[in-house]
Image (tube, rainbow, N blue to C red):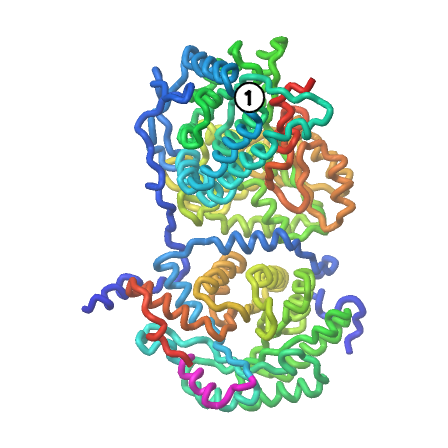
Amino acid sequence: MAQAPVLPRGFELPLEPRLPRIGSVDAVALEERAASLAKRSIKREAKVFALDLAVRMMDLTTLEGQDTPGKVAALASKAIRPDPGDPSVPSVAAICVYPNLVPTAVQRVEGSSVKVASVATAFPSGQSPLEAKLDEVRWVVEHGADEVDMVIDRGAFLSGRYAKVYDEIVQVKETSGDAHLKVILEVAELGTYDNVRRASLLAMAAGADFIKTSTGKLPGAATLPVTLCMLEAIRDVHEETGRMVGMKPAGGIRQAKQAVQYLVQLHETLGPGWLTPDLYRLGASSLLNDVLMQLRKEKTGTYQSPDYFTVD
Amino acid sequence: MTELERKQDRAPVPSEWTYASAPEARDLVTLQDRYGHYVGGEWLEARETYTTISPATEEPLAEVGQATPEEVQAAVDAAREAYANGWSDVSPSERAKYLFRIARILQERSREFAVLESLNGGKPIKESRDVDLPLSAAHFFYYAGWADKLEYAFPNRKPRPIGVAGQIIPWNFPLLMLAWKIAPALAAGNTVVLKPAETTPLSALLFCDVLRQAELPPGVVNIVTGDGRTGAEIVKSDGVDKVAFTGSTDVGKAIQRELAGTGKKLTLELGGKAANIIFDDAALDQAVEGIINGIYFNQGHVCCAGSRLLVQESIYEPVVEKLKRRLTTLRVGDPLDKNTGVGAINSKQQLDKIQELVASGAEEGAEIYQPPCRLPEQGYWFAPTVFTNVAQSYRIAQEEIFGPVLSILTFRTPDEAVEKANNTPYGLSAGVWTEKGSRILWMAERLRAGVVWANTYNRFDPSSPFGGYKESGFGREGGRHGLEPYLDLT
């Protein structure tokens, strides 16, 4: 356990020689900025660019009790070839599944560019002993997951035991080895943007490759303002250390229009350098078909019935 | 090649993300070739005219009247007559009815007005659509509500209208300033002669159509166009009982001299050189947005613009770094493009003034920063500009630039911030950015400015009074206070 009563070890390291500065967030102004960016009018070739990018950045997700190998197999096919009618549509970035489904997923996406992400660490609540969480992480990595989506211990965070949160992330990161680590803050449970900012910095200091808004299991998952808040934290870490941390909004993104808004926000907050699936993901289960439909519309000029897009 | 393939061919995925142009439809607004003066509910053919243009392209838009003394007199006479023969007898709730109608019509026609405002004034459509138009309508709604409640606004006094109000408005928010002037004047029972600014007369002229739609009795609002000479005629006219002016401090002083001893009432809303004060505990990213909004909103053509940035020295570097970075994402260009954040400078004259002052800043030793941006070749443009290393004594820290130019100064303690902020002949507005509530109150008590914004900037509401200290003028517009200049309160 780290010896850090107020700030966890490493949290403030890059901020030397100044005093550590976590900073704060003004909720009203943050929401205004997010709303103003959401009003961008993205048309024609700029829209095609965004929709194409949205597909390449997508973590196609299924996280249900009723998930079966059959369901995951279908999802994998969709991920590799989202629109059989248009081969120019790229594959998505990854499929995101529960640990038990990792072996099926790995087998099904083999030979493609699609990665397998697995949730772990007692997803979605995180309310399990650390050993159990680490075992789970070890298991999914051994079975071929390329990416691990962990949850932070919100109970510890909200009771001020930041060091515990920090230590857990450090250990999960070590256990993940080469797999990319996405740290889910579950913003809906953090209550304030100040907390979101603090948790974001904490996760990045502990070694997160990505920070992610939500499990998708609660109402009030990803929103534009909360994502902006996290992007600003990522930007500060980049300014101070040069390290580029990725971002993944997840939950509640269902329409192509929303996806474009998220990408505009990313583009204008972190710049063109972040417009890559290596640094940005959209976690979604039902977004893909709407994006495909809009892409087809942009290319052909007409909308087509949802019946022309496969439901997987 | 099939039809589908051809279409696919035409829309290749570009290698980097540049937003395609997204212009608002210009044909939403139909302009006449020539406009007269709106007097007594009729169009009076203008004897002399000049050409009004789009500052973004220098394209001529229409011929508008340069009102002669006789034409101004006709407008004042029409207002006098309307006041004497009817409008002053109209019941207060009836007056409210007309104001409510005007407000609703403005809402209904807001896209049309927004396009015209951007076309004639150069401001981004995003602002005319989201700020100018909603606020203009809100002002009419707000004062409509007061029209039949004046005795409650001023208990134990007898509010009576004054008579004819002569109103002269600036070019930075043409329609909104018209609303600020006309709404309280009519709510209080006065009639009006209004002159829009020389460079931006078109929205006021289109507004005459709204007055007709609302069936406002003839002569209650009269609009004459022209340059400063027309304004001077309004001020001089014996038939005018009250003058309201928004514009430059020099002209305001001249008006005050002219009116001394005449008994006419006067309100002036003049220039400013507001301090936007950032403390080290502020929410930095939001404060940076506030700085941007404070100075680049409407190309800095805002009397309350936060043109002097006072940053606490301990956070000077990160603030300047963040600010410069944000500047590179400002989108300067076509005012009618929905993604434009900074539009055209309103006139050649204003551009010259900005250039002159910016040159003086560089000469006096300040360090200039402008983000890389390609400005259109036609029209009047100036890149968003930041000056660092600015001393309090430099002209760019003292004089109102009225353009997209920010001067950054530093301070060490709250006392020093107050001292520097107040060290100006102006006193219209100020901004304070801190997470500490007690400090906001402490600062607000000490800042000599009509408006002090905390953790926000350039936020307006019809219910909030607006006006200045010292050379920023006197009298308040907005709120209950805004009725007072239009009433005789014996």
Spot occupied by residue B67 in the image (x, y as percentages of width and height): 41, 17
Query: In which image quadrant can residue B468 be found?
Result: top right
Give the letter of the chain under mark 1.
B
Spot occupied by residue B209 in the image (x, y as percentages of width and height): 40, 30
Considering the image in quadrants, where does the N terminus of chain B appear?
A: bottom left
**Total numbered circles:** 1
Query: In which image quadrant can residue A169 be found?
Result: bottom right
| Residue B363 visible within the image | yes
What residue is disc 1 on?
B190
Q: Secondary structure at mark 1?
A: loop
Crowding at mark 1 (Cα within 10 Å: few <14, some 14-19, many 20+): many
**Does A74 lie within the magenta span?**
yes
Q: Is residue A71 left or right of residue B36?
A: right
**Residue beneath the point at 40% across and 40% down:** B112
Extreme residue toward the left, this view: B1
Spot occupied by residue A217 in the image (x, y as percentages of width and height): 59, 75
State the residue in front, A109 or A188: A188
State the residue in front, A251 or A142: A251
Q: Is residue B139 left or right of residue B73?
A: right
Magenta span: predominant SS is helix
B63 above or below B286?
A: above
**Residue beneath the point at 69% across and 17% down:** B490
- Residue span colored magenta: A65-79
Spot occupied by residue A238 in the image (x, y as percentages of width and height): 59, 63
| Residue B359 visible within the image | no
A207 above or below B320?
A: below
